């Protein structure tokens, strides 16, 4: 009988046996090639894939994804993906291309809807894509062996620093699962002058003791170091009230449930107080319109480039 069988291995968990005389048979093997099941006949193929999915992590993921795409959420996601097919915009982090980036409403119904905002490939936002271009054009991150610390990394960060094997990169966050180490920004577990570049984007508005955090960022930067920092700014003078702790009140006053203040243009004063020499860089204004369109950027996205200025202190 063995002579009448053609055997094909399927993802290390099953073999497809094609009998010349009896048709198709799929035989499952567990760890150590132990046979754990057998479904004969052509009709058993779908059932066989399902059973194989229970035994193989890869097939299980594929099967779960296929089932999700038959749900209303999955069908909606397919519709969104089809509507965004195209080549008009491009993500500098992951290379995703489409007719436009996804609106924020695709991911969250509770935040204000902003069109052309989020990359579906790596979840970069406008400010992150602008940061990428800034790092590429205004720093030596892509050519020199820099020590880099990023506070509160995102999925796009992993993509960037994976392409820069020469950079010594550490990410830090209070609770994110994406981070390489956990820590409190107001008491960084890092030595003095140990980084050449620190990226701290949209973090300080969540930190009660933001002045303490800025001091820490100043402490860990080397003499020639650079801090790139951004916070949301929507007014002239910072609105702050430590007694406001209720999430609804914070949302009403500061714009988001987990924001502890609403920064104004006087944000720069807190950086200067800590010893930084600050350049408020309107980098987006220097970019041609076709670059703004291609990377889904926006004007009015200021980057605070801060020199620790240790040598004059
Ligand atoms: Zn992307």
Image (cartoon, rainbow, N blue to C red):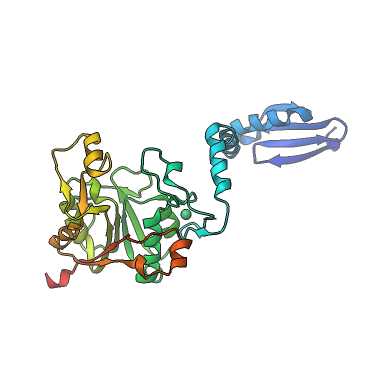
Q: Quadrant of residue 246?
A: top left
Residue sitting at x 32%, y 49%: 181
Q: Is residue 92 above or below residue 111?
A: below
- Is 134 left, or right, of 48 in this rendering? left
Q: Is residue 47 above or below residue 101?
A: above
Instruction: Quarter of the image for the C terminus: give it.
Output: bottom left
Residue 259 is situated, as x and y percent measured from the top left of the image, at: 24, 43
Q: Which of these two is toward me, 2 or 295?
A: 295
Residue 118 is situated, as x and y percent measured from the top left of the image, at: 44, 50
User: Does any portion of residue 281 appear in the rendered image?
Assistant: yes
Q: Quadrant of residue 112?
A: top left
Q: How many marks?
A: 0
Residue sitting at x 26%, y 47%: 183
Q: Which of these two is toward me, 265 or 77?
A: 265
Instruction: Quarter of the image for the N terminus: give it.
Output: top right
Residue 60 is situated, as x and y percent measured from the top left of the image, at: 58, 35
User: Does any portion of residue 163 appear in the rendered image?
Assistant: no
- Is 172 left, or right, of 121 in this rendering? left
Q: Is residue 109 above or below residue 84?
A: above
Residue 53 is situated, as x and y percent measured from the top left of the image, at: 61, 33
- Is 45 left, or right, of 140 in this rendering? right
């Amino acid at each position: 009988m063995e002579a009448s069988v053609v055997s094909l291995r399927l993802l290390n968990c099953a073999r497809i046996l094609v009998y010349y005389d009896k048709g198709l048979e799929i035989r499952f093997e567990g760890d150590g090639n132990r046979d754990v099941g057998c479904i004969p006949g052509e009709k058993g193929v779908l059932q066989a894939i399902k059973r194989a999915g229970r035994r193989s992590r890869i097939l299980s993921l594929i099967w779960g994804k296929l089932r999700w795409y038959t749900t209303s959420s999955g069908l909606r996601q397919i519709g969104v993906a089809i509507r965004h097919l195209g080549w008009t915009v491009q993500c500098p982090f992951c290379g995703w291309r489409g007719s436009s980036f996804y609106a924020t409403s695709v991911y969250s119904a509770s935040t204000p809807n902003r069109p052309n905002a989020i990359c579906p490939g790596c979840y970069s936002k406008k400010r992150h894509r602008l940061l990428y271009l800034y790092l590429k054009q205004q720093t030596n991150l892509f050519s020199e062996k820099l020590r880099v610390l990023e506070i509160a990394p995102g999925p796009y960060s992993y993509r960037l620093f994976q392409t820069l094997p020469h950079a010594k990169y550490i990410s830090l966050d209070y609770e994110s699962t994406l981070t390489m180490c956990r820590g409190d920004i107001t008491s960084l577990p890092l030595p003095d002058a140990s980084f050449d570049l620190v990226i701290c984007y949209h973090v300080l508005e969540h930190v009660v003791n933001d002045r303490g955090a800025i001091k820490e960022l100043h402490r860990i930067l080397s003499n020639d170091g650079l801090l790139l920092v951004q916070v949301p700014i929507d007014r002239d003078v910072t609105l702050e009230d430590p007694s406001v702790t209720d999430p609804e009140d914070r949302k009403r006053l500061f714009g988001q449930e987990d924001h502890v203040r609403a920064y104004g243009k006087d944000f720069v004063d807190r950086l200067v107080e800590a010893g930084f020499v600050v350049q408020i860089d309107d980098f987006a204004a220097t970019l041609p319109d076709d670059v703004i369109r291609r990377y889904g950027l926006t004007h009015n996205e200021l980057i605070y480039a801060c020199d620790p200025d240790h040598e004059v202190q």
